[in-house]
Image (tube, rainbow, N blue to C red):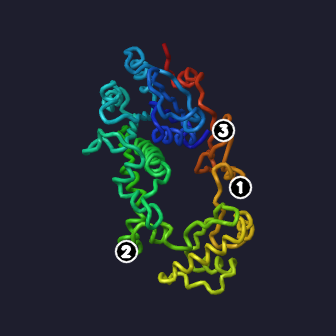
Amino acid sequence: MGPLAGIRVVELASLAPGAFGAMILADLGADVLRVDRKSRNRGLDLPAGVLDRGRSTLSLDLKDSGDLATLHRIVESADVFVEGFRPGVAERLGLGPNDLMDRNPRLVYARMTGWGQDGPLAARAGHDINYLAVAGVLEPIGPKGHRPVPPLNLVADLGGGGMLMALGVLAALLERQSSGQGQVVDAAMVDGSSLLMTFIHGMRDVGLWPNGRGENLFDSGAPFYDTYECADGRFISVGAVETEFYDQLVTTLGLTEAPQQYDFSRWPELREQLAGAFKQRSRDEWAEIFADVDACVAPVLTPQEAPDHPHNNVRKAFIQVGTTKQPAPAPRFSRTPADPPRPLNTVDARTMLDSWAVDLP
């Protein structure tokens, strides 16, 4: 079940970006076979059940001619191939686009890298923080007067990397319906990170992002778009950008002398008023007070608390996969919902490949 039911994906095991992209395809109903390298150093690979849900897995030695031939046969029956090597490595292994697409011209070949397939940095090592730095994403993130703060590994690895790789795969599969041909999808985290900054570039272009780090509308510069500590040391989030929400905010807090919202000269004063008000009650007390108030105020929950929030409960936004509570697949589909994800399955690769009409030696 799922909108990608019947799509066959072969994923060469890699780190988080490629694994996340393949997880999305599996969440959407694709058959995903992850190929583990028998001799690989696992390094920072995550435990089973986190990013590798929904897969079957098969271990092969990519330097063994027999195992390589087996992988070639499997890919002949696949729709998508995903690899996350540095440029040139797949070719040296005999798994480059020409090696596989000559045998399967309908194959969508997805390449997940940090710097892309060309350019002066293509062969260099890197991590999320480095791609953000070069893409111009990292510098604006952080409070005023402080150094840039990496936003976990959400932007380059996962959003600009794995998620955009999955989008590229879907676009190539859609195009294949008319052309009958596969193609290479070059997904680079530095490119994807830049793309995610499009809105900020637009704001800067029209003069709505004129200042330095921590002094603009969405970077904690505006006192009505920030987090505040409560009486219990926990935090509340405020996003009252529009005037009607700002008015609800200051009214509910009892700030009768609050400045006009966009009087920039009085933003320091407004910040002090908001900070002082939120310090009077606990986070959960404020959450209750604002529960029925349209002021764009919400409690800052820990990852452990989030699954128990009433809204997330109703939406079934978190699910149990094996022994791990984790986010549910998204988005949702009215007519072709996918089955709930299952944990990584290390034993039924032969069953999956039988359905692909591929015989393993």
Along the horizontal axis of the image, is 128 left or right of 318? left
Which residue type does callout 2 highlight? Val
Residue corresponding to mark 2? 206
Compare marks 3 and 2 and give the one earlier in the sequence.
2
Query: Which mark, residue 309?
Result: 1
- How far across and down, in percent of the image, does residue 63 sit? 37, 19
Give the SS element for disc 3. strand
Which image quadrant: the N terminus? top right
Task: Depth check: give the residue in front, 291 or 234.
Answer: 234
Task: Depth check: give the residue in front, 205 or 104.
Answer: 205
Give the SS element for disc 1. loop
User: Cα distance, mark 3 to mark 2?
Assistant: 46 Å
Residue in view at x 39 percent, y 47 percent: 189
Compare marks 3 and 1 and give the one earlier in the sequence.
1
Query: Which mark, residue 324?
Result: 3
Which residue type does callout 3 highlight? Thr
Query: Which mark, residue 168?
Result: none
64 up-or-down from 293: above or below: above
Task: Depth check: give the residue in front, 314 or 246.
Answer: 246
- How far across and down, in percent of the image, does residue 206 sit? 37, 74
Give the SS element for disc 2. loop
Between disc 3 and disc 2, the foreground one is: 3
Residue 174 in sight here: no
Residue in view at x 45 percent, y 46 percent: 157
Along the horizontal axis of the image, is 52 left or right of 62? right
- How far across and down, in percent of the image, does residue 277 sit? 66, 75
Please identify the quarter of the rendering in which residue 56 is found: top right
Residue 283 in sight here: yes
Number of other residues with Cα within 10 Å of mark 2, as a class: few under 14, some 14 to 19, many 20 or more: few
Number of other residues with Cα within 10 Å of mark 3, as a class: few under 14, some 14 to 19, many 20 or more: few
Residue in view at x 35 percent, y 43 percent: 186
Number of other residues with Cα within 10 Å of mark 1, as a class: few under 14, some 14 to 19, many 20 or more: few
